[in-house]
Image (tube, grey):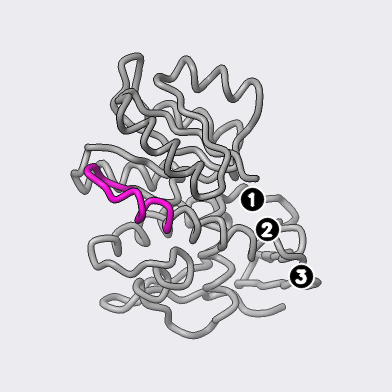
Amino acid sequence: MKLIYIVEDHDVIRNGVVQYLTLSGYEAKGLKNLEEAEGAFGEAVPDLLIQDVMLPDGDGFTFVKGIKQRFPRIPVIFLTARTEESDRILGFELGADDYISKPFSPKELVLRIQALFRRIDESDTPHDNVYAYSDSENTMVIDDNEHVLSINGTPVSLTAAEWRIVFYLASNAPNLITRSQILEECFDYSFESYERVVDTHIKNIRAKLKPGTWIDTVRGYGYRFSGKKA
């Protein structure tokens, strides 16, 4: 049974989400502030963190940033009343897998969670595949069995979402890939308002995939993995 933490100071929302997730077959634990959340992480690392942003004892964005530094592959869904596009982009820049605005449908939340876990379970299925790519001066190795990516022998730390994007682009090279295709294949949804989320992930990935230039932008269309199979 997958363990989910819900960090939310509003009692009705927190208890409602816990109840709905429990009925859906998950082990759900409600936490009313960041102090309780930090204590819970000291006892057990969950399979998913659902995080509010505005809390009485601090900022959820800052908390998730710290959690991601310690547990970079833990999936995170922000559940918040902050609906500005800049807030959504910041959430994804911090490594969130999804961002749901209040008010929300509990059924939609469960469907998003199920889709997220399905992607994770599929990506965790062992594959005996190791791929090597090169640009003019550098070599990238993608180990789809161990989920390890390295450049010139140096491991690169990617979030789960970043890994899915890189592997999808590399697997389809040299084809051009649209933002909508990335959303549909890597995130299970395709809303136009979320296309900037793809741009944010690509920016973060490019910052990590150095040295070398591995992902090209095709203006007005999307992206293309530029590495050549070695």
Image quadrant assignment for residue 139: bottom right
In this image, 11 relative to 172: left or right? left
* Pick the front one: 19 or 69: 19
- Tell me the mark number nearer the camera, choosing from 2 and 3: 3
Residue 156: numbered disc: 1
Among all residues in the image, which is located at the extreme right?
A: 128
Residue visible at 42% across and 58% down? 111
Question: Real-space Cα distance between discs 2 and 3?
Answer: 14 Å
At 81% across and 72% down in the image, what residue appears? 128
Q: Does 107 appear in magenta?
A: yes
Query: For the residues marked 2 and 1, what is the alpha-carbon distance in whole angstroms?
Result: 6 Å
Counting residues from the start of the chain, the first of labels 2 and 3 encountered is 3
Q: How crowded is mark 1: few (under 14 residues within 10 Å), some or many (20 or more)?
A: some
Between 133 and 69, which is closer to the camera in this rendering? 69
Pointer 3: what residue?
A: 127
Q: In this picture, which residue range is highlighted in magenta?
A: 100-111
Type of residue at label 3? His
Label 1: element kind: strand
Q: Disc 2, disc 1: CB below 8 Å?
A: yes
Q: Position of residue 155 (x, y in %)?
A: 70, 50
Instruction: Locate residue 140 relative to residue 53 in the image: left or right.
Output: right
